[in-house]
Amino acid sequence: MRRRTLLAAGLGLPPILAAAHATVHPDTRLHFPRDHGAHPQYRTEWWYVTGALEDETQALPWGFQITFFRSRNDRADDNPSAFTPRQLIFAHVALTDLAHGRLRHDQRIAREGFGVAQAATADTDLRLRDWTLQRDGPIHASVYRARLASRDFALRLDIAQTQPVLLQGQAGYSRKGPDPAQASHYYSHPQMAVQGRLRLLQREHVVRGRAWLDHEWSEALMHPDAVGWDWVGMNLDDGAALTAFQLRRRDGRPLWAGGSWRAPGQAVRSFGPDEVGFQPGRLWVSPATQGRYPVEWTLQTPVGRFLILSRLDAQELDSRATTGTIYWEGLSDLRDMHGRRLGQGYLEMTGYVRPVKL
């Protein structure tokens, strides 16, 4: 590392080469707006927005997902060329179109720099050609502006904070495995208010809805025995927010679990690894990949048992052209054990076709 530091100083290379790779510590406190921005000293980072939209017809809602990823490329450390891709920026956008029973999605990738892609460090300012996600406003009233045009749909959304930031885990330190190094810095914005426009099939819709934003960064997120994870972020109709996740072994047994609950106006209740249980229910088999996804779950938490029911089975995304991963990500309902609706949000399932590599 000392040799690389001297090389960076002599050649005027980006600061990432001159700094040691960071580790996630439980005593690190997050500071905003700085920590809304990128953390290029860490290996992996993502900004992830999901939600449900409706227009004036009050017909079936649309689900949407917007994700920007940043990945540090360690293989570039010893290459002095300015064209070496030291940071890679990926982005995914997806629309769950319930009226037509299909998932529409697109993806992009580029090296950071050269006016093509960026992940700014001072605040959320993400760009991948003409796809953007930017934060405006004071830190207690953030508004994220998303502008993404795909092949057959486009989103122009303003996504506004309505509640205080939710620090996941221990004040933003979120364990992801039995080794304390398997952790991330992680915060959420649940219950965000969305308004904007959706262009779909040559028609413009004025839309509104609710959304959930996650921002997470890590150096070593996954244990070697973990092949993937299951995650839910649910906005309840009464204003509460539920997060739950598990990392799975190859045989399907849980390796680690966690999550949180926050009722309106109350403190966050963080869940320990032995307090969360995912019981799979009905399976959907992807005709494209033969992945077998549980599209219904029973979720056990310290605040109760819940049912998670997919709104559409076919919400698999093939992102091998960018992140190298095939995963299921989709709009889902949260219900009580009697089937009564409590809210809605997103369910994510990874590692069902091939192990996830981060």
Image (spheres, rainbow, N blue to C red):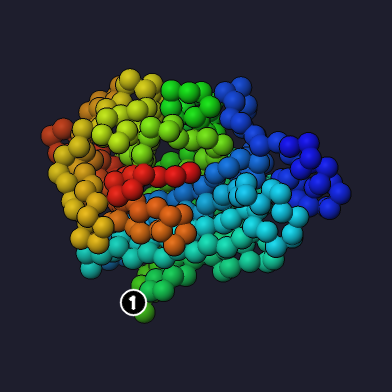
Hey, which residue is sitting farthest right in the picture? 10
Tell me: 184 left or right of 302.
Answer: right
> In percent of the image, x 57 and y 56: which residue is there?
89
The residue that mark 1 highlights is: 201
Amino acid at the residue labelled 1: Leu
Image location of residue 125, percent across then percent down: 62, 54
- Above or below — where is 324 with respect to 35? below
Tell me: 202 left or right of 35.
Answer: left
Image location of residue 62, percent across then percent down: 31, 60
- Above or below — where is 293 with respect to 181? below
Regarding residue 165, the answer to whether it shows in the image is: no
**Element type where label 1 sits in the image:** loop
- Above or below — where is 268 with respect to 158? above
> In percent of the image, x 49 and y 64: which residue is there?
108
Image location of residue 236, percent across then percent down: 32, 39
Query: Which of the image's four quarters has the N terminus?
Result: top right
> In percent of the image, x 58 and y 30: which residue is there?
24
Tell me: 267 left or right of 353.
Answer: right
Regarding residue 173, the answer to whether it shows in the image is: yes
Tell me: 5 left or right of 225.
Answer: right
Q: Give the camera-side residue of 212 and 121.
A: 121
